[in-house]
Amino acid sequence: MRAFHRSFCICFVSSHLPCCLSHRFGLPHINAGDLLYKEVQAKTPLGVQAATFMDSSKTVPDHFFLELLLERLTQPDCAASGWLLDGFPHNKEQAAALAAAGLVPDKVVFLEATHAVLLDRTK
């Protein structure tokens, strides 16, 4: 019998909808930025390295996020019920890196809006 996994990969500007979906479907809500922030706050070796980019207002390289996501998405809760990924991937390279690690969602939600709407929602 084939195992059923409910995996979602969602990228949002706001975390309100992912939280609602996570609660509704009983899925772990995984936010890539939050994972990195926790590492920085805990002053782990990865967090200290990432902080050097953040403190100088530089983009944190993808490999930092990928390392954290690969660790988190393979934990028992995600393996058992699936996951809802918030804020990642942002581009084809990031999506390909997840796929290469065997982490391919079976559902993807893509929301499109004008630049003006997105700017208004950040206020």
Image (cartoon, helix red, strand yellow):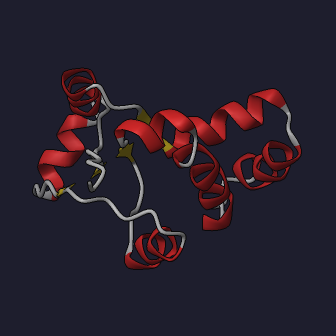
* Residue 97 appearing in the image: yes
How many discs mark residues in the rendered view?
Answer: 0
Q: Is residue 117 above or below residue 81?
A: below
- Where residue 43 appears, as percent x and y from the top left, is 85, 33
- Residue in front for this viewpoint, 3 or 51: 3
Which quadrant would residue 15 be assigned to in this image? top left
Q: Is residue 108 above or below residue 40?
A: below
In the picture, measured across the screen, residue 80 lies left or right of residue 44, that is left
- Residue in front for this viewpoint, 27 or 80: 80
Q: Residue at x 58, y 40 (%)?
A: 75
- Where residue 104 appears, as percent x and y from the top left, is 37, 65
Q: Residue at x 89, y 46 (%)?
A: 45
- Where residue 23 appears, as percent x and y from the top left, is 26, 21
Which quadrant would residue 111 be assigned to in this image? bottom left
- Where residue 62 appears, as percent x and y from the top left, is 60, 66
Which quadrant would residue 14 be assigned to in this image? top left
* Residue 11 appearing in the image: no
Quadrant in which the C terminus is drawn: top left
Quadrant in which the N terminus is drawn: bottom left
In the picture, measured across the screen, residue 123 lies left or right of residue 45, that is left
Q: Residue at x 28, y 25 (%)?
A: 26
Q: Residue at x 36, y 37 (%)?
A: 81
- Residue in front for this viewpoint, 55 or 44: 44
- Residue in front for this viewpoint, 44 or 59: 44
